[in-house]
Image (cartoon, helix red, strand yellow):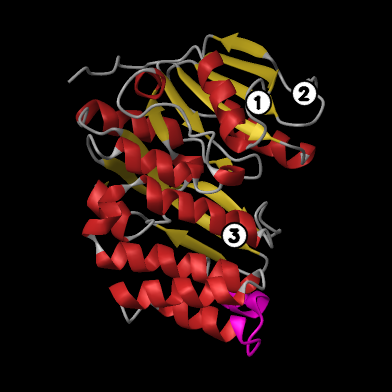
């Protein structure tokens, strides 16, 4: 097992297609990390002109603070989140690569806590932290398990392991067992989940048990209402990983989500088909029942979503 240097350089990749003020908040929170090593921030602009972020420092070093570098690039690969993240990974100079969504932000101790954990447990294939979800009306802390294995991710997405908290070894993403982000995923939906499933074939994701990332749910998600993309992405993932066949609960969960997405999109026949597939593996799968209610126009999908999102969760 190759161990990490004491303070390896970390590249943070932010893929964005707009939201300049939120992006600046995210970048500032990364540049303000108390981590003792160098931090490189690469912002990849997808489908829009590059914002040079000239009001933010592009490079600075002070005796009391290690090197911080800010770079801006255009997505040079497949349009979308997967291509944007891969553009950043390939351009990265750090030994480690972290991701942050352009509307999220980090607490100052995030990287230092994570790298301390990795130094003690080099067997981890990736590192996460707890998160704080801020909705329009409330705030919820979500703390993931200390260790999450592939079997856990097959049964549950373990949403407390959020993409904005994750750090990987760059070598694993380039040529190792994990590989780059899958650009064949329809609309890049579930790209973070796909990456976690591939990584945890080889070891656990370990987490710092503190909420060190703020996830903002006070606005619509990029995928809000894009039900066809959600259904296509989840169908792709279910077919890609044969390991799902070994877990009835996990297969039923994904099938229930696909059923709900089809129902919300108005594809009633497909919704019923996937609901039956979910129930054939786990009759307790509530998403399939919700899909039938939505498909029959008894309850709007938006109402179902608003109920769970108020609790800092999703369907």
Q: CA distance from mark 2 to mark 1?
A: 9 Å
- Select label 2 or label 1 by which is in front: 1
- Asked if 248 appears above or below 167 in the picture, the reply is below
Please tell me whether residue 140 belongs to the stretch shown in magenta: no
> Whole-percent x and y of residue 106?
54, 40
Q: Which residues are magenta?
A: 295-309
**Mark found first going from the N terminus, 2 or 3:** 2
> Whole-percent x and y of residue 54?
80, 19
Question: Residue at position x 57%, y 76% from top?
Answer: 269
**Mark found first going from the N terminus, 3 or 1:** 1
Q: Is residue 126 left or right of residue 107?
A: left
Q: Quadrant of residue 138?
A: bottom right
Is there CB contact under 8 Å for labels 2 and 1?
yes
Q: CA distance from mark 3 to mark 1?
A: 23 Å
Disc number placed over residue 53 in the picture, else none:
2
Observer-nearest of 22 and 64 = 22
Disc number placed over residue 43 in the picture, else none:
1
Q: Mark 3 highlights which residue?
A: 134
Q: Is residue 167 left or right of residue 121?
A: right
Q: Is residue 250 left or right of residue 311?
A: left
């Amino acid at each position: 097992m190759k161990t990490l240097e004491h303070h390896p350089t970390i590249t943070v990749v932010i893929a964005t297609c707009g939201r300049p003020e939120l992006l600046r908040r995210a970048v500032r929170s990364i540049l303000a990390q108390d981590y003792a090593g160098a931090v490189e921030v690469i912002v990849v602009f997808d489908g829009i002109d590059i914002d040079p972020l000239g009001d933010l420092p592009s490079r600075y070093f002070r005796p009391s603070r290690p090197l911080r570098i800010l770079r801006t690039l255009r997505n040079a690969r497949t349009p979308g989140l997967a291509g944007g993240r891969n553009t950043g990974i390939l351009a990265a100079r750090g030994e480690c690569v972290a991701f942050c969504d352009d509307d999220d932000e980090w607490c100052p101790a995030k990287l230092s806590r994570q790298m301390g954990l990795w130094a003690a447990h080099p067997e981890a294939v990736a590192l996460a932290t707890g998160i704080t979800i801020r909705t329009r009306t409330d705030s919820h802390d979500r703390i993931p398990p200390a260790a999450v294995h592939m079997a856990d991710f097959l049964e549950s997405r373990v949403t407390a392991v959020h993409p904005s908290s994750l750090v990987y070894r760059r070598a694993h993403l380039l040529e190792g067992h994990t590989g780059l982000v899958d650009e064949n995923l329809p609309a890049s939906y579930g790209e973070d989940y796909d990456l976690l499933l591939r990584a945890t074939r080889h070891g656990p994701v370990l987490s710092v048990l503190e909420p060190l990332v703020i996830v903002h749910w006070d606005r619509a998600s990029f995928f809000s209402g894009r039900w066809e993309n959600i259904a296509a992405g989840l169908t792709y993932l279910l077919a890609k990983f044969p390991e799902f066949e070994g877990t009835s609960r996990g297969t039923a969960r994904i099938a229930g989500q696909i059923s709900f997405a089809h129902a919300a999109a108005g594809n009633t026949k497909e919704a019923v088909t996937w609901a039956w597939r979910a129930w054939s593996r786990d009759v307790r799968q509530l998403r399939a029942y919700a899909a039938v209610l939505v498909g029959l126009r008894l309850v709007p999908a938006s109402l179902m979503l608003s109920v769970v999102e108020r609790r800092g969760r999703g369907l």
